[in-house]
Image: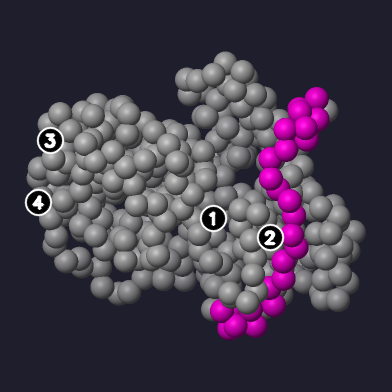
Amino acid sequence: MRILQLCPKPPRPSLDGGCLAMDAITQGFLSQGHHVKVLVVSTEKHPFDIKKQDPDYVNSTSIEAVTINTAVNLKDAIKNLVVKKSYHIARFSSQNFTDKLNEILDSTPFDIIFIESLFLASYASAIRNKSNAKVVLRAHNVEHTIWEGLANEKGNKLKTWYLHKLAEQLKKYESKKVNDFDALITITKEDASTFKSLGAEIPIHTAPFGMDFSSDITIKSQDANHVFHFGSMDWKPNIHGVEWLKKDVWPIVRQSIADANLVLAGRNMPRSFRSEEDKGIEVVGEVKSAAEFLKRPGIMTIPLHSGSGMRVKAIEGMSAGIPTVSTTIGVCGLGVIHKKHALIADSAEDFASALIALLQDKHLANQLACAGKEHIQKTFSNKLIISELTAFLHEIKP
């Protein structure tokens, strides 16, 4: 098939889970012999520099980028609030992007146009005017549920009101827009159910994030000697989750294990997350290699309380044989069973108890690490996921 993939940020370099998820789709399609053209949005947070890209990747995808200023502007935010339009969507609206899209569609016929995330959904009408291709939306999350979760957390009343408004506008947009497409791809079955409840009547297929694994699912036994959180810290659910981990969970752990250590890693670490050695908290910030960082003998935490979709870092970490403690939301869509593949806890007390248990019981930590790795590698093979997705796309294409 000839596929045009539209991305709200460059898939490479792989700076966060969203980048990894988009690149996994690209590489999966290419590995099956499909022709993929990639058009991305270059932003101040995620700039695109073709000189820093792998030449083979550039040649295989014919990747191009259009710069859009998506920085938050108070005046524009208020304007969109008044006219009752989603500011999240408006920030990605660009005539330059439309022009480039038209140029590509005028020169090349496509079978499938694969739109990554709701933020580029507004371009569906422009595509319809130029192409007979089937237009597919891949929803990385049910976006309004993220902001509902953030709004429901305790905080400033004005901020809470505004977050509720953002969530309300996004929900209205998602409900209205979803049926503009020929098909919907969700990351989890839970998200598929949510979209159906919003009124989605188009074909829906679930294609989770996948990785290419080696055939070996055994792990080297190593005693976990610290706890860590590893994730991009320019995403609000991660920020709120780590704040909860630091303030509510970690003091309980330290009461039981006085020398316990917590390591916080990830790009765009807030300045407020300074190292607190006296509390056993070390902030390392951005790391050069995620793969190397995940080789450390630690216990992975996923302390999320809002969001939807799938946590790519959970798949990366668990597939690497790392014992894991997560909230229910953190492992949503992974099929992870409590006490079999990982420990799942939603209250600060239970989360702390789970961390203490793994720090004190090396056998339990290694048992969960092995079971978790086996489950992830058997379930999230990118080859299998892409094969099933391709079969679905063949059914809906012209």
User: Residue drawn 65% across and 65% down?
Assistant: 48
Judge depth for marks 1 and 2 and give the one in front: 2
The local crowd at label 2, few if under 14, some if 14 to 19, many if 20 or more residues have their Cα within 10 Å, is: many
| Badge 2 element | strand
The relative height of residue 129 versus residue 37 in the rendered view (above or below) is above
Tell me the kind of residue under disc 4. Answer: His
Give coordinates of residue 287: x percent, y percent: 39, 60
- Per the image, the residue denoted by label 2 is 42
Quarter location, residue 220: bottom left
**Circles 1, 3 touching at the beta carbon (< 8 Å):** no
- Per the image, the residue denoted by label 4 is 363
User: Residue drawn 69% across and 77% down?
Assistant: 62
Q: Earlier in the sequence, mark 3 or mark 4?
A: 3
What span is colored magenta in the figure?
Answer: 54-82
Q: Which mark is residue 246?
A: none
Tell me the kind of residue under disc 3. Answer: Ala
Front residue (pair 121, 57): 57
Left or right: where 191 falls relative to 216: right
Judge depth for marks 4 and 1 and give the one in front: 1
| Badge 4 element | helix
Front residue (pair 45, 64): 45
The local crowd at label 4, few if under 14, some if 14 to 19, many if 20 or more residues have their Cα within 10 Å, is: some
Give coordinates of residue 185: x percent, y percent: 61, 53
Left or right: where 213 falls relative to 153: left
The relative height of residue 243 versus residue 331 in the rendered view (above or below) is above
Q: Earlier in the sequence, mark 4 or mark 1?
A: 1
Tell me the kind of residue under disc 2. Answer: Ser
